[in-house]
Image (cartoon, helix red, strand yellow):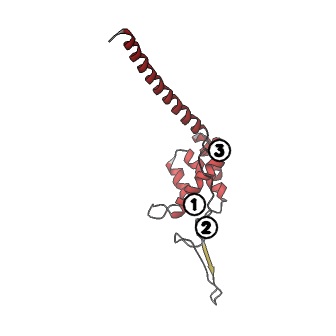
Amino acid sequence: MNRNQKIAIGCGAAGCLGLIFLVIIGAAGYFLMRSRSPAAGIRTTNFNRNPSRNSNSNSPFESNSNSDSNGSSGDEGKSSMADDDKHKLFQAAGGTQDSEIMQRVLRKFNFIKEDGSSTDEYAAFLKDHITWAVRNLEFIQSVSTPEKARAYVEAHIND
């Protein structure tokens, strides 16, 4: 092998390594830009679900029957919070990194059944929460530390 062939092989290897390096840098740049823009590529569709049923009958006993899909009756333990406030409290509870606070919030919203399993409403809420979070990054940043999140939860858990 002569000197020119060795130079050609060296340049070819350096060129391949350079291309590999450029691909890695390009991929890193792409993922970095993508992570800075959380709304990129996420479809913002809002689904509203209301599983509550209210049946009132006019009988001599004047009985009113309220039921929802998880089998509880009336307003026992039901939260009267607006959806936006529920999402804020849920987000802040998660930000506390305290499982007891998270359990309190989930029980407040009746997202946990007696046996400890989650309800269908919880799954729907989580799906809606993703969309909510994309639109409310400013609030999420306002409860970005466990201390700030805990203060928000303590101030709003009884609303």
Residue 16 rendering spot, x and y as whole percentages: 44, 24
Q: Residue at x 65, y 63 (%)?
A: 80
The residue pinned by badge 3 equals: 137
Residue 10 appears left or right of 154: left
Quadrant of the rendered image containing residue 78: bottom right
Between residues 57 and 24, which one lies in front from this camera angle?
A: 24
What amino acid does circle 2 point to?
Answer: Asn
What amino acid does circle 3 point to?
Answer: Leu
Secondary structure type for disc 3: helix
Between residues 74 and 86, which one lies in front from this camera angle?
A: 86
Q: Residue furthest bottom?
A: 60
Quote the CA–CA distance across marks 3 and 1: 22 Å
Q: Quadrant of the C terminus?
A: bottom right
Q: Residues within 10 Å of mark 3 (few under 14, many from 20)?
A: few
The residue pinned by badge 2 equals: 50
Quote the CA–CA distance across marks 2 and 1: 14 Å
Q: Residues within 10 Å of mark 1 (few under 14, many from 20)?
A: some
Q: Residue furthest left?
A: 1
Residue 22 rendering spot, x and y as whole percentages: 50, 27
